[in-house]
Amino acid sequence: MTIRSLPQGMISSSETMGTAPGYMPGFGNDFETEALPGALPQGQNSPQKCAYGLYAEQLSGTAFTAPRGKNERTWCYRIRPSVKHVARFSKIDVPMWKSAPHVLPDVISLGQYRWDPVPHSDQPLTWVTGMHTVTTAGDVNTQVGMASHIYLVTASMQDEYFYSADSELLVVPQEGRLRFATELGVIDLEPKEIAILPRGLVYRVEVLEGPARGFVCENYGQKFDLPNRGPIGANCLANPRDFKTPVAAFEDRAARSRVIIKWCGQFHETFIDHSPLDVVAWHGNYAPVKYDLRTYSPVGAILFDHPDPSIFTVLTAPSGVEGTANIDFVLFRERWMVAEHSFRPPWYHKNIMSELMGNIYGVYDAKPKGFVPGGMSLHNMMLPHGPDRNAFEGASNAELKPEKLDQTMSFMFETRFPQHLTEFAANIAPLQDDYVDCWADLEKKFDGTPSVK
Ligand SMILES: O=C(O)Cc1cc(O)ccc1O
Ligand SMILES: [Fe+2]
């Protein structure tokens, strides 16, 4: 499907991107958008000369030869080609942002871990310097696995831009509002929304309301996609039309600017004399997107038992093995609990996948205390976990009438790979030393008789 947007958020040559963003609906659509009339060529990608003296450039998000349904690329019509936006790299240190493989000899990743919210910093931290890696998994060089991060952002990037050649970033805000001014348009993001920033896309992050805190899943592997739906059919879960991609917006601005590039786990800088956000028009299906989590329609057990959490998958990033995700992004949001003669919270379990969870707001049913908004937990590969004693006793004895789990939103980054803690996660972030004690008081109820206690 092709969607044509009217030019909005138009930027005159000397202005920066200051207007409210406009968006086009759909997931993975073939979009087209132009910030100046006639800037987008029709009927071909590479005219001999482009309107307005623009340069044509392709951004490929998949191999040229990827199968048609998976092939993603975008054609950009820009003031300068990207080669004018990067030159002569030097390595820089971004100490808190780590990449896999990052296995530390003195850190034990085998365990059940939980953290309180990481406090905001009084230092000026940008999107790049404020990214604090919690876990890494897989290998950035072979493009498998992921990293999970907490971002603490207090300062806008000024004449500074970033792109990751390593990964796409799934952003899950928990506090504050951010603006992502990207090559392909502007996304404003706040809690209860998520965004995906594709690999290779250049952007600047501004603080609209700070301080800002949130979670990032850095996906080294194949892109996030909507899950297959099987017997669920065409509707509910995340509906494609609720995903929003920004319309074209550009700036034509001369200023000494720094471009920071993450490439194979290392950071590099380069300096140029203009803004690289100079795409006046574009068309294609490789683009940033945002999604309002409040539009997610959960489907669940409406008679008895508790299904696998995969029922709540918002997005899935495949690995090479069918049905075994590199990453699933799973959402536990407001919903009705109606199951009869059932233990309603999550069951006790041990999982070959590893589960990194974060709380956006409210109370999570398996952990009524201790897993608080802004907090995180990690139940690593094959590490048993489940409801704490209070949740178990409460749910085992509750009257099973329909009950609304209200005002609650937590999520999970679930990966097929074990997750390794960083130094920050193990020794700096507010780790709850007593987390495992939440299961200590679970009683032995078995006494050899079949009666139910
Ligand atoms: O461990 C967790 O809390 C996440 C989770 C939720 C659920 O409903 C079933 C399985 C599962 O891993
Ligand atoms: Fe779990």
Image (cartoon, rainbow, N blue to C red):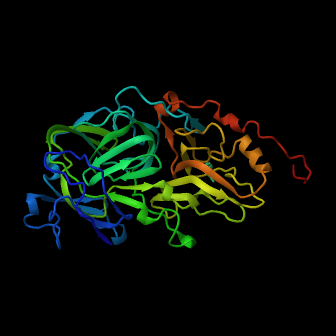
Report whether 45 appears left or right of 305.
Answer: left
| 168 or 173, nearer to the observer | 173
Instruction: Report whether 205 appears left or right of 258.
Output: right
Image coords of residue 453 (percent x, y): 87, 49
The residue closer to the viewer here, 394 or 452, is 394
Residue 246 location (% of width, % of height): 31, 57
- Place residue 123 in its image quadrant: top left
Q: Nearer the viewer, residue 70 or 12?
A: 12
Q: Position of residue 71 (x, y in %)?
A: 32, 66
Determine whether, in the image, residue 452 is placed left or right of residue 30: right
Q: Which residue occupies the foreground of this view, 150 or 200? A: 150
User: Does residue 365 show up?
Assistant: yes
Residue farthest to the top, as pictured? 122
Q: At x 78% / y 50%, what residue is drawn? A: 396
Can residue 149 be seen here? The reply is no
The N terminus - image quarter: bottom left
Residue shown at the point (33%, 35%) measured from the top left: 126
- Above or below residue 34? Residue 151 is above
The relative height of residue 248 versus residue 157 in the rendered view (above or below) is below
Image position, residue 162 (x, y; %): 28, 43
How many marks are shown on the rendered structure? Answer: 0
